[in-house]
Amino acid sequence: THSYTKYNSWDKIQAWISSISSSNPDLISRQVIGNTYEGRPMNVLKIGKKSSSTKPSIFLDCGIHAREWISTAFCQWFVKEALSTYGSDSEMTSLLNQMDVYVLPVFNIDGYDFTHKSNRMWRKTRSRMSSTSCIGADPNRNWNAGWCTAGASSNPCSDTFCGSSPESEIEVKNVADFIRRNKSSIKAYLTIHSYSQLLLFPYSYTFQLAEHHSELMTVAEGASEALRSLHGTQYTSGPGAATIYPAAGGSDDWAYDLGVKYSYTFELRDTGRYGFLLPESQIKPTCEETMLAVKYITSHVQKNL
Ligand code: 0X9
Ligand code: ZN
Ligand code: ZN
């Protein structure tokens, strides 16, 4: 059975997606944006008070990288918190009244399933190419943003393989199409990874500063401060290239260059003691503190609509 304080298998998450959407028709609607390489449906949950007109929105995804299980846990936590605090928490109520939040609970479903069944440390998609026996591409090197020019590999056997072309991975194509389709409403793009305790923003494909660098930095520092206030967890904020490493073809840079100004990549706990194998006992504190940072960003976005 599904639990917010456990790392749920894809089968459990899929059942959870169905049941939570049908139990909360006033606040959640869902849509399939396409299937994964292996044919699993990619569900996006739209969370927000129903409205006759299109609301401004935020796109949140988890699980781009298969082994980053705390990321996937966070999207489920976010949905639960949104539903359970709407109407009592003023920030959440205001957010969901004014905006919709699109949540993609698991981006790389095939990879995530593979980490549960075969190889816990798998990172990439599970796509096949006729030219090689190596499997998958890095779904955070496959976007059309300086594609494969830095911090990515053209070797299909590498963990950072950029793919045969931008959006060669069907999961990336499905999400990119969705964001392009809803571009006029999407005001923020938030993507959750682990680990290193960082709050990153563009650019990662170049060391050049983004046009909105100072605002993005100020908001990131405010969000990190909010996060730290709960359990003392320290985050570092900054542009990806200078803060973690140059790496082209990432979703945050792509969304930003499309025109989504508030584009952030979270790298959740920890700093390496457990790394990707973060114990389940840390799901609750990690998700609680991350909620504060996400809400800090969404409040700033709302103020600047
Ligand atoms: O390398 C990545 O894709 C991310 N780190 S991870 O350890 N989760 O793999 C960082 C992504 C930062 N943004 C871009 N490189 N665009
Ligand atoms: Zn990652
Ligand atoms: Zn706590």
Image (cartoon, helix red, strand yellow):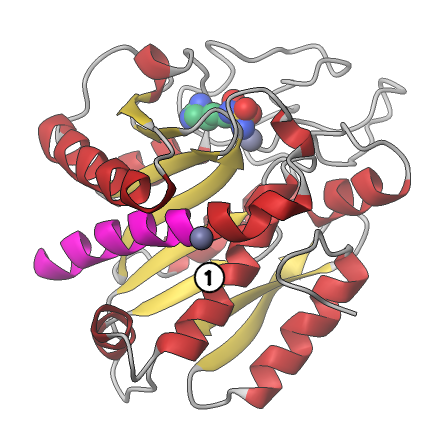
Rendering quarter of residue 214: top left
- In this orientation, does residue 77 appear? yes
User: Was residue 89 drawn as part of the magenta stretch in this picture?
Assistant: no
Q: Is residue 103 left or right of residue 278?
A: left
Range of magenta residues: 288-305
Residue at the disc numbered 1: 78
Q: Is residue 203 above or below residue 26?
A: above
Q: Is residue 27 above or below residue 127?
A: below
**Which residue lies at the image location 58% right of the left edge and 40% below the top edge?**
64
**In which quadrant of the rendered view does residue 215 lie?**
top left
Relative image position of residue 84 (x, y in whole percent): 43, 78
**Who's the residue at 29% across and 37% down the image?**
256
Looking at the image, which residue is at 34% across and 29% down?
A: 235
Question: What kind of residue is marked 1?
Answer: Phe
How crowded pointer 1 is (Cα within 10 Å; few <14, some 14-19, many 20+) is rated as many
Q: Is mark 1 within 8 Å of ligand 3?
A: no
